[in-house]
Amino acid sequence: MRRIPASTGTFARSSRHPQLALATTILAVLALGACGTEKASTGGERAEPAGAVGGRPDAAFGAMLDEAAQSCPAPALPKAPPSGPVETLPPGSVEIPPDTEPIAPTTGPEVELNTRDWCASARHEERIARALWDLADPTPTKVRTILHGLGYIDDRIHDLKQSGAATRFFLDLRDKGGRLCLEGSAAGEETVIDKCVAPATGPFITPGEQKR
């Protein structure tokens, strides 16, 4: 809504229509008040404290997630191992002992993360590892600062703590129905960032807590 400029005597100096001047002034004041109320109710101009978790930080975080997954395929669960009757071997074939055959995983990132999560995870792992690789004395405070600089917000950073010479942490990167999380260990050239699986819904719980 446009701001109505205050008159500099147009109504005050009018002696021919004092009642009209007073009524117009009241209408102008009411219009300004209504405009302010509308802006406050829609959030258009409402001031927010610095660092508050609100629209702007969440919007920036969401944009970063979208950018990381920009070239990724649509979410789709990995294909399950083929099932059905076991094929018989032709005569004369040597049967491979069962204990040498690979066992298809039934839990973990391989079967619980969709294709979009797998694709986006590579982008997140690379950018975080690069940022932490040359960090001397990776304390929790320094690691948090770097994560903030990369666009990860405090609401998504969990269990950030010192563990020996390394600082360990988890990142909750669940987005658009996915279950992606990252487990990190910042230790200079020994930095490791790996994907993990978060609960489908509800608050974030680390993989270790899920197993308890």
Image (cartoon, grey):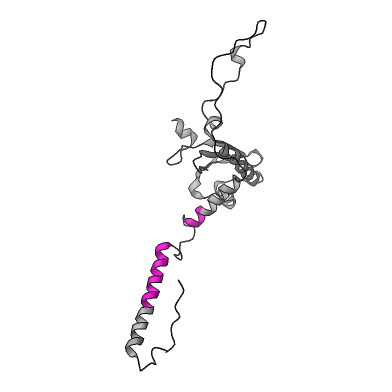
| Residue plotted at (39% across, 63% down) | 41
Q: Position of residue 146 (x, y in %)?
A: 59, 50
Q: Residue at x 38, y 75 (%)?
A: 31
Residue 121's place in the image compared with 148, above or below, is above
Residue 206, how many percent across, how many down? Answer: 48, 37
Give the quadrant of the C terminus. top left
Q: Position of residue 107 (x, y in %)?
A: 51, 28
Front one among 200 and 159: 200
Nearest to the observer: residue 8 or residue 209: 8
Residue in the picture at 49% in, 60% down? 50
Task: Spot the residue most to the bottom.
Answer: 15
Quadrant position of residue 84: top right
In x, y percent, where is residue 4?
44, 78
Q: Is residue 38 magenta?
A: yes
Q: Any magenta on residue 45? A: yes
- Figure quadrant of residue 13: bottom left
Residue 210 visible within the image: yes
The majority secondary structure of the magenta stretch comes to: helix
Total numbered badges shown on the rendered structure: 0
Q: Is residue 27 left or right of residue 136?
A: left
Query: Quadrant location of the N terminus?
Result: bottom left
- Res 135 visible: no
Residue occupying the far left of the picture: 19
Residue closest to the eye, 123 or 147: 123
| The one of 203 and 137 positioned closer to us in this rendering | 203
Residue interval drawn in magenta: 29-58
